[in-house]
Amino acid sequence: MITDTFDNLTEEIIKVGRNENAKKVAACILTFSNEILQYVLEQYDCTKIGDLYSSNGANPVYGFSYNGKEFAVYMSYVGAPGCVADIEDTMTVINTDKYVVFGGSGCLNKDIARGRVMVPTAAYRDEGTSYHYAPASDYITVKNSDVVAAFMEEAGLPFIQGKTWTTDAVHRETRGYFEKRKAEDCISVEMECAAVQAMCDYRGLNAYFFFTCGDLLDAPKWDARKEKNQKKHTQHDPGHFEIALELASYIVR
């Protein structure tokens, strides 16, 4: 059973490789949006540090300077398994313990406007990856939630804190599951948070999350809440990378 998946007593067969000679960066920023990555490459003086490899091909990791600090950025796979594997593989390419993770999320409360920044406090573990990194439980605490919230307050950015629902199955977000998660005060749904937090706890890393409120589940029918080709107030909004970069600067002061 999945509740018996966590095994911290026997040896890992495929070990995580930590490269002590990897490029040191203050923090690494993950985006799930190719459009945002292209924006970063156009707006910042980026240099490729190395590649993350899978059967999908090479995934470049880039470095750039900002406010006197060196940062890394790359485009993550969507979904818990690929996202977590990528973060672990970055340890052969860069040397940092800080990861800023931002992207879109579905909204479970109709009173939260599209484009509003959400800061998760805990994540419901409706995926499989986290159970390999932490004992079974319904929720996992997002440890740096208050740090992210403090940054948002200092920056004067409107945001909301609350629980999130991490799921592997975007097309199996049923009405029954939605009602249960909303009753437990979850305000968003996404595919990576619980797993990334569990892995970071296990590996001694720090994750800093925020989401862009997107499509609405809290309606008689699913509502995408965006116009055709809209970028502003979506997960492809370049302005949200700027928030992520300022957050990265904040956590490495």
Image (cartoon, rainbow, N blue to C red):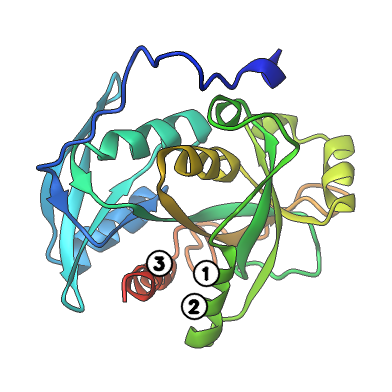
Give above or below for 187 relative to 150. Answer: above
Q: Position of residue 94 (x, y in %)?
A: 20, 46
Q: CA distance from mark 2 to mark 3?
A: 10 Å
Q: Looking at numbered disc 2 in the image, what kind of residue is underneath it?
A: Phe
Say what secondary structure mark 2 lies in.
Answer: helix
Q: Position of residue 50 (x, y in %)?
A: 14, 40
Give above or below for 187 relative to 173. Answer: below
Q: CA distance from mark 1 to mark 2?
A: 5 Å
Q: Which residue is mark 2?
A: 151
Q: CA distance from mark 1 to mark 3?
A: 10 Å
Give the foreground label among 1 and 3. 1
Rate crowding at label 2 as few (under 14), some (14 to 19) or many (20 or more) other CA atoms within 10 Å. some
Rate crowding at label 3 as few (under 14), some (14 to 19) or many (20 or more) other CA atoms within 10 Å. many
Direction from residue 185 to residue 232 in the image, left or right: left
Quadrant of the image occupied by residue 160: bottom right
Say what secondary structure mark 1 lies in.
Answer: helix
The residue that appears at 51% across and 17% down in the rendered structure is: 9
- Return the residue nearer the eye: 18 or 106: 18
Q: Which residue is mark 1?
A: 148
